[in-house]
Image (spheres, rainbow, N blue to C red):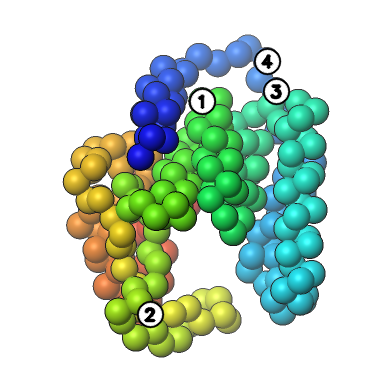
Amino acid sequence: MKFLPFFVACIVAAQMATGKTQNPPKASDAIYKVFVEDGEDARNGLSKFSEDELTARAKARDAKVRALLAAGELKTGEDFHEAAFIFQHGDDSEHYLFAHVLAMEAVLKGSNEAKWIAAATLDRYLQSVGQPQVFGTQYPLDPNLAHSAKNTEAGSSPAPFLTGRTLAPYNEQFLPDSARLDFCVPALVQQKQNVAMFNAGKRPTDTMRAPGCPR
């Protein structure tokens, strides 16, 4: 858990970063276009592309984001928030860690929307390296439960999702609910209700984030 002291330091820094410039930079159209493409591939990619094509497209997006970052084109909290979402769709711990750093940069630059993805990318990173999550943003499949495909809600996504989910591995005592709420993560009791909803074949859309937070 050596990574966590760095994260705690970032929390303190984020809470201190309240100043605003008189002429704030404008969000980048370039990162927004990559962000939109990434979201479309995540939702509907398999209906348009093969898995190999999707992998190639994802790698190309990663390269574009890194090039924009190296060129100093990412300037606003919104820019870094969108970049974080792109990398959290990766498939290994390095992607998740990089996404977390981008999300914390977004928070430092004043993006309230980035608070949840900052928590989620830390949880995803921890689970990817064999450690329990600490916020409770991840609902992976429970290997001890049956997984049935359900889609019971009218007007929902055509792609079914699997039941048999859990919050484990999860260190529930590591953070108080107050810290979760600061990062737009719902309280522990709501998380457990979300698990029950998932496993009843319902999407807990309105309760995946804390009340009053952007969705």
Give the total of numbered labels: 4
Which residue position holds label 3? 25
Up-down: is 172 above or below 176? below
Mark closer to the chain start, 1 or 3: 3
Mark closer to the chain start, 1 or 2: 1
Up-down: is 203 above or below 187? below
**Helix, strand or loop for disc 1:** helix
Amino acid identity at mark 2:
Thr
Q: Closer to the camera: disc 2 or disc 4? A: 2
Picture coordinates of residue 208, whole percent (x, y): 38, 58
**Helix, strand or loop for disc 4:** loop
Which residue position holds label 2? 163
Up-down: is 123 above or below 56? above
Contact (CB < 8 A) between labels 4 and 3? yes
Mark closer to the chain start, 1 or 4: 4
Which residue position holds label 4? 23
**Helix, strand or loop for disc 2:** loop
Instruction: Point out which mark residue 33 bears.
Output: none
Residue at the spot x=64%, y=65% of the render?
A: 42
Picture coordinates of residue 6, whole percent (x, y): 42, 28
Which residue position holds label 1? 108
The residue nearer to you, when weighing 182 against 124, is 124
Amino acid identity at mark 1:
Leu
